[in-house]
Image (cartoon, grey):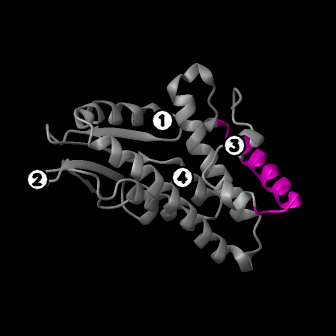
Amino acid sequence: MGWRFIPRDMLRHNDFLPILRSLPGDRLDKISETVQRLIEEHPDQRVNLSAGPAYFLMHYLMSDLYTALALYQTEPAAGQRKLLAKMDAVLQRAGKKANRKMRFMMVIPGTFSVARTLVPKVMVMGNGRGFMVRPVDCGKDGFGFDVTECPYFRLFAANGCPELGPIFCRFDEAESADLPGLVFLRQGTLCTGYDKCDFRYVKKDRTNNPGG
């Protein structure tokens, strides 16, 4: 994937490959040029392998973010609404694919305890790299975290495309739907006008106190 964010790498490692593969070469060149511009305009998002696991987390997340922006910005205004629907559908399929993996894992004994320990720790790896994540104590029957700063929210708004944000929020909901023995609870997200993105995962029989 390269030591830093590189357009050709980011265009190979993102959820929008089904759309990219249908585009002509000249459009792909424009998208690659736009990704390069976005990388240069936001040097604070750059991260290299010295960041450890955070590098791979951020490379995956920012690949989706920059590709989405480049796809949308290079689309004529008349076609943006249709493209947004296609991008939403692609993310929903990706979320459902991730959901199948999560459902499989959640029936393995001990998975909940591992997730309760590791998931909040993994998410805070993005702190200082566009994210600010705060773990939330949900008791022994749940786990969760709040995202109070998000590069999706900030960069989509800064580039005049705030409508892209909610489709990424819906990915979370598709990924976490109907997990065995577990409920995903959310009040809102930054991209939909809430003051934070709240993530709560609570055992189905203990949903009364999922954390503040």
- Which is more foreground, mark 3 or mark 1? 3
Type of amino acid under label 1: Gly
**Which residue position holds label 1?**
126
Residue under the point 56% across and 37% down? 58
Residue under the point 72% across and 77% down? 79
Q: CA distance from mark 4 to mark 2?
A: 33 Å
Mark number displayed over residue 152: 4
53 horizontally vs 136: left or right: right
Type of amino acid under label 2: Asp
- Which is more foreground, mark 3 or mark 2? 2
Depth check: 160 or 50 in front? 50
Mark number displayed over residue 205: 2
Residue 31 is a magenta residue: yes
Residue under the point 69% across and 43% down? 10
165 horizontally vs 83: left or right: left
Type of amino acid under label 3: Met
Q: Whole-percent x and y of residue 93?
A: 51, 60
Above or below residue 133? Residue 167 is below
First-in-chain label (3 vs 2): 3
**Which residue position holds label 3?**
10
Tag 4, which secondary structure?
helix
State which region is magenta: 22-43
- Which is more foreground, mark 4 or mark 3? 3
Q: CA distance from mark 3 to mark 2?
A: 41 Å
